[in-house]
Amino acid sequence: MHISWILIIIGAFVTRYIGFEGVMPIRENSTSNMFLSEKTYLTVMVDGDVNGEVVRKKLEDDMLLSEHVNNSFTWNYDLKNQPFTIEYVDFIENAKEDLIENVNGDQFLKIVEASGGDRHDHFLKWGDVTSIHNILFALNNPTEGAININILNDELIINSPFEGDYLRMADQKQGQLIENSNQTLQLRSLYNVAGLQFVFPDDIINGKFEIVKSEEAGVFNDGLFLKISTENESKVIGLLGAKGIVNDFKQIRVGNLDFLMKYGSLEYELPFEIKLNDFIAEKYPGTEKSYSSFMSKVTVLDDTNFDYDIYMNHILNHKKYRFFQASFDPDEKGTVLSVNHDFYGTGITYIGYFLLYLGLLGIMFFGKTRFKDLAIQLEKVKIKKKSLLVFFLMFSSIAFSQENHEHAKAQNLKQIDSLIVNSPVSIEHSADFGRLVIQDSGGRMKPLNTFASELLRKVSKSDKYKELNADQVLLSIIKSPYLWYNVPIIYLKKGNDSIRKIAGRGKKEKYASFVDFFDDKGNYKLSTQLENSYKSALPNQFEKDFIEIDRKINLLFSALEGKILKIFPIPNDENNKWVSFSELETNSFTGIDSLYVKNVLPLYLGSLEKDIQLEDYTNSKKLLESIEGFQKKYGLEVLPSKNKIKAEILYNKYDVFNKLFSWYMYIGTLMFGLLIFQIFYENRHVNSLVSFCKILIVSLFVFHTLGLVSRGYIAGHAPWSDAYESMIFVAWATVGIGLAFGRKSNLTIAATSFVASMILMIAHWSWMDPAIANLVPVLDSYWLMIHVSVIVGSYGPFTLSMILGIVSLILILISNEKNKKKIELNLKELTIINELSLTVGLIMLTIGNFLGGQWANESWGRYWGWDPKETWALISILIYAFVLHMRLVPGLRGKWIFNLMTILAFSSIMMTYFGVNFYLSGLHSYASGDKVITPDFLYYSLAFVLILGFFSYFKYIKNFK
C-alpha cells in the first residue's frame, strides 16, 4: 500500500509539471487546431536598444490570483545590464475597462446600443470616426456617409445620412430624424436609424479609460495591476484577462525600455486538426434548457482522417491527447471541448490507485492485519461474557402533534367545504385518473398520482385533505377550481406572524386560502415583500419564508388554472413536448386531433359530474382510456411502461421511507429498553423479545432495500443522485453495517436502528425534496453507481461509530464499583466493534474518494480540482486515519479517548456532507445559492458531547485506570 502512495505522488508530479490541459471552442462546420490553456499566464516582452541593436527578453509564468488572498510577487530582471522590476499592485475580479470622468482627459460621447439582444457601450472620442455595426459615427469630424455629431451654439447637433425616428424616454415623445439635416441631438432618447437602435445617455464628458470592477453579471475578465520600474522611472499598468480569454498585448514605455504585456490563457497548437460537423443537444421531453445529454460529432484531420462522437463519459483519445465534452455555446451551434495531455501522469496514477484499492481491501480479507486481530478479540470477549451487558438511555422523545385546524366561520366557506368533501370522485375512479401520465416542468414523465401527491405535500404539508386522498383532491381542483380558491389549504410556517397578518389569519392558524393573499381589487398582498426578498443575494430566514409561501401560491395557482396539467403530446414534436388544455391554442394540433384535444377534457369533466351522482363511472373511464390512447399514439417514445407506472403508484402509496423512520425508532427504542433490563435481570422471555426485535429490524432493512430498488427502477438511475436520495442511502448503509457487526452485539443493532430513524427523519425535513427528478448529463454515468455508492455508503459505518462512541461514554459514566466488571466487558466489546466499523468506513471513504478522481478524469480530464467535496473528503480521511492510529501514540491510548474522538471526528463527515452540499458552492452543492441556516440542534449536540466527555473522563480514571 505504501508503494501505491509513492506512485500516486509521482503521477501527481508528472501531471503537475509535465502534463497540461485547456479548452477548445469550435463552431459547427469549422476546423481548429488551437486550444486555450487551463491556467492563466502573465506574459511580458521587454524590448530595448543595446548598442544600436534591438534586443528582446521574454518572461512568462502561470498565475493563480484571487481577491481574497495575498497575491504579492516581484520579478527582478535585467536586459543587457539594464535592470527592471515588475511588481504586483492589485487584482480585481469581474473587471471591465470603462470611461472614468477626469478633467484632464479627452472628450468622449457615450453611445449605447443593444444589437443581438445584449447591451454594448461605445465611446466616441472627440475628432474620431467609429464604426458601430457598419454604421459610421463621427464626433466633431465631419465625414461623408457618417452620422455626424457636432457642437453648435453650445448645443449638440446630429446630422444623419439616413432617415430615422426617436422616442424620448422621459415623456414618450416621438420625433423624426430627417436625412442630411441638422437637428438637436436628443439625449436619453431611443434612436432607430438604418436598422440600428441606440441611445446617447449623457452629454460629452472629459475622461480616461481605466480598469474598474463591474457590477454586471456575465463579465468574464479580471483586472491585474502591475508596477514597472527601471532605474529612473516607474509606471503602473492595468491588464484585462482571465482563464479562457486571449487578449492583445498592451504596450507601455518605462525609462528606455518598451514592455508588451498581456494576462490570460495561452494558445497551444495541436499536431492535427478537429472539425465540428454537428453539435447535438438533447433535452428532456418538453423542456427548453433541461439537457439530458450533448454530443459533438467531429472529424479528426490527420494522416488518416476519421469521425468520432464526443459526449459526456465518452472521450476522444488521439496522439496522447484526450478530448472531453465540457460545454457548448448558448445558441447550440458550437462546442467547448476540454483538452488534456497527460498520458504518462494518468498511467502512473491509475497504477497507484489500483494498488491502493488492492491494499485497502486486503486489510479486511488477507494476511495478519489489525482488522482480523480485532475480530478475534471480539470473539474472546463474547466467550468471556456470561450475559450480554448493554446500556443505552440517551434519546429524547419526539412528539408530533397536530393542532386542530380552525375553519372560517363564514357560512359560504362551510358550504364550499361540504361540496368538496361530501361529493368526491370515488377512490377507484380517482385511482384510474392517477394512472394517467403527465409531463412535468423538468421533462420527467410520471403518473398524475405522483404529481397529485407532490402538489398536496408541497402546498399543504399533508398527503390528504380531510378524507380525500391526493388523486381525489387533484380531480376536485380540476373539476371545480372556483371552490378551491377559498379553501384554506396553503400551509403557514410557524414563526412568521407577518405572513399570517397579511393573510388575515390568526397566530395559531396553520392554513390560509388562495384568496387570502389578494385584496378586494385583486392586488397581490405579498408583492412588496417579495420584491425585496428576490432581490437579496443572501436572503435571511424572514425573506426565505416569503419566497417559500410565494412558490406555494404559484404552484396552487398553476393547478387551479390547469396550466401545469400537461397530458396532451404534440403530434410529431421534435422534443416530445406535451401541453396542458390551456396551452392548446398556441400549439400545432390540426384536423381531428385538434377537435379531440379541445373537447375531450370538458367532456370528461362533464361526464364526471353525472357519474358522481349515478355512482357509475363507466363513461368517464372510457374517456380516460381515450386520453391514454392519444398519449400512446403520439407520445409512446417517452411514455413510461405500465409496470413502471404501477411501481411508482405503489411507491407513492406506501411511502416506505417516511414510514420506516417511525418503525426504526419504535423497534430500536423497545430493543434498548429490553437490553437495559437485561443488565440487571437475566430473563428467558426478555431474550426472546430481543431476538424478535432483531428479526423485525432485519425485516425493516429488507423493506428499506426494496424501497431503494423501487426508486432506482422508477427513476431509471441509481437512487443516490441528490440530497434526499443520499440520505436514505446513508440510512440503508448504516443499518447494513450495523447488522453485519450486530451478529456479535445486540447493542450495535439497537443503536443502528435508532441512528437510521434519525437520518430518515432529517431526510424528510422541509429543505429536502423527495421528488424523483431527471439527472444532469454528467451524473448519467455508470460512475454514479460506483463512486457515489461507495463514498456515501462510507457515512454509514462512521455514523454507527459515532453512536457507539456515545453509548460507550455513557457506559463509563454510569459505572461504579459494583458493575464495573460487567461494564468493562461491554465497553471492550463496543470499542472493538467501533474500531472495526471505523476501519470499514475509512477504507470505503478512501476508495470512494479516489474513484471520484477517476470519474472526474474520465469525464472532463481532471483528477483533482480542489472542489470543496474533494477537499473535505480528504480532510475526513486524514482525521479518521489519525483516530485509528492513536493507539500507537503514548498518551492517546485508551478506550475513553478513542470513543470520544470517534464522536468528534464525525463532525468532519457532517461538514463533508451537509457543510459542502448546503453551505459551500461547487460541483457537489445542493444549495442552489440559498443561504442555509445552521440548525440549533447542532449547537446543543456539541454541548452534549463536551459535557458527556468531561464527566465520563473522571469516571474512566476512577474505575478503569
Image: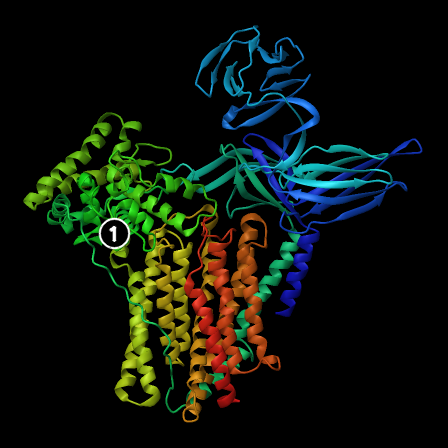
Quarter of image, res 154: top right
Q: Report x, y in % for residue 319.
A: 65, 45
* 938 with respect to 361 (left or right): left
View extreme (bottom): residue: 818
In front here: 887 or 135? Answer: 135
Quarter of image, res 561: top left
* 628 with respect to 779 (left or right): left
How many C-alpha atoms fall within 10 Å of the one at disc 1: few (<14), some, or many (≥20)? Answer: few
Q: Report x, y in % for residue 849.
A: 54, 61
View extreme (top): residue: 180
Q: Is residue 129 at least partly visible in the picture?
A: yes
Is residue 903 shown above or below 381?
Answer: above
Q: Is residue 265 at least partly visible in the picture?
A: no
Is residue 734 shown above or below 214?
Answer: below
* 903 with respect to 157 (left or right): left
Residue located beneath label 1 in the image: 506
View extreme (front): residue: 153
In front here: 868 or 343? Answer: 868
Q: Report x, y in % for residue 935.
A: 42, 61
For label 1, the SS is loop
